[in-house]
Amino acid sequence: MGLSLQVFAQEIQGCILDSLNSAPLEYASIGILNTRYGSITGRQGVFHLEVPELPPESIVRISMIGYKAQSFTLEELQNKDNIILLAVDPIPLAEVSISPMGEAYSIGTTRYNLHGNWCGWGGSRFGKGHEIGTKLNLGDQPVHIRKLHVHLHRQAYDTIWFRLHIRNLKDEKPFEELLTSNVIVAIDEEKGWVELDLDEYRIVQEGEVAISLEWLKISGVNEDRAMKINQKLTKEYLLFNTKKKQGIIYTRWGVEGKWNTGLEGSPAMYLTVQK
């Protein structure tokens, strides 16, 4: 006897709010576990997510840094204007001793491959919630992360906004988020080294971590920057040069997708830190 599997080819939608004051949550993540299907809320906390041909018991996870995540089945969210409230996740602050800061220094390679060996996003099929990053060792003592530096091969947008993630590792893959609030950075340079100031976020971490940038949104496309990527003329893209000495690259295509790792093509990025 044959089995019939019910599937959905539809869009789910809704609005994500802070449970305390009903304020809309911009940049909240909506993703279907272990798939590439996901999205990010806009300024009013609204999301629209197209989910073709997935079984009704598929799990939709809704999350945001600093808040407790919630999960639903796809069936629970279908055919509704969903209003979803996320509660703040209180993070106990560790005791910090204040002492004079040492001299600033770099962690990670400042060298990159000048020709070829790019990594990043090419074409409109990539977008909200997709991540790319690498592994860095911060050392066995806590350091204050002051700046992130990334080297652009080239990008086609006026501005592109990213969310920074710093995670610990499990089985050599990104695992738990270590940041307790959103760190949003914008890049408007066309190419070359970009310096992103993180001082205001007072980030202190240690040990081996995965550093990644999550694509949030873009503004403006410069079609005169169109270039060939994989033998195809592409008008929308952002490409990082890769490290001179390679290194581990982490990619995740979808806010709840599976992590991919590789030993080549790691984006050229380093940190400026102080002890």
Image (cartoon, rainbow, N blue to C red):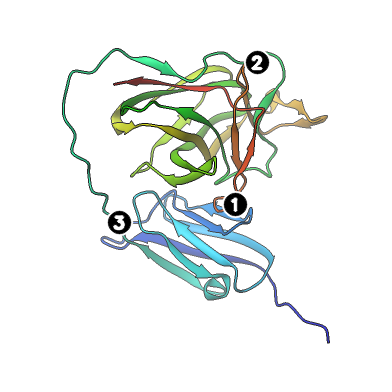
Counting from the top left corner in percent of width and height, residue 224 is at 69, 23
Decide: marks 2, 3 in contact (CB < 8 A)? no
| Residue at image coords 71%, 14% | 115
Vertical comparison of 260 with 69: above or below: above
Residue holding disc 1: 257
**In front: 72, or 98?**
98
Counting from the top left corner in percent of width and height, residue 164 is at 45, 36
Q: Amino acid at mark 1?
A: Gly
Counting from the top left corner in percent of width and height, residue 141 is at 31, 27
Residue holding disc 3: 88
**In front: 34, or 209?**
209
Q: In the rendering, which numbered label is found on residue 3?
A: none
| Residue at image coords 51%, 36% | 213
Q: Residues within 10 Å of mark 3 (few under 14, many from 20)?
A: some
Left or right: 15 with respect to 245? left
SS for callout 2: loop
Residue holding disc 2: 113
Vertical comparison of 94 with 41: above or below: above
Left or right: 199 with respect to 234? left
Which of pointers 1 and 2 lies earlier in the amino acid sequence? 2
Counting from the top left corner in percent of width and height, residue 231 is at 83, 29
**In front: 174, or 271?**
174
- How far apart marks 1 and 2 lie (CA) works out to 29 Å
- How far apart marks 2 and 3 lie (CA) works out to 42 Å
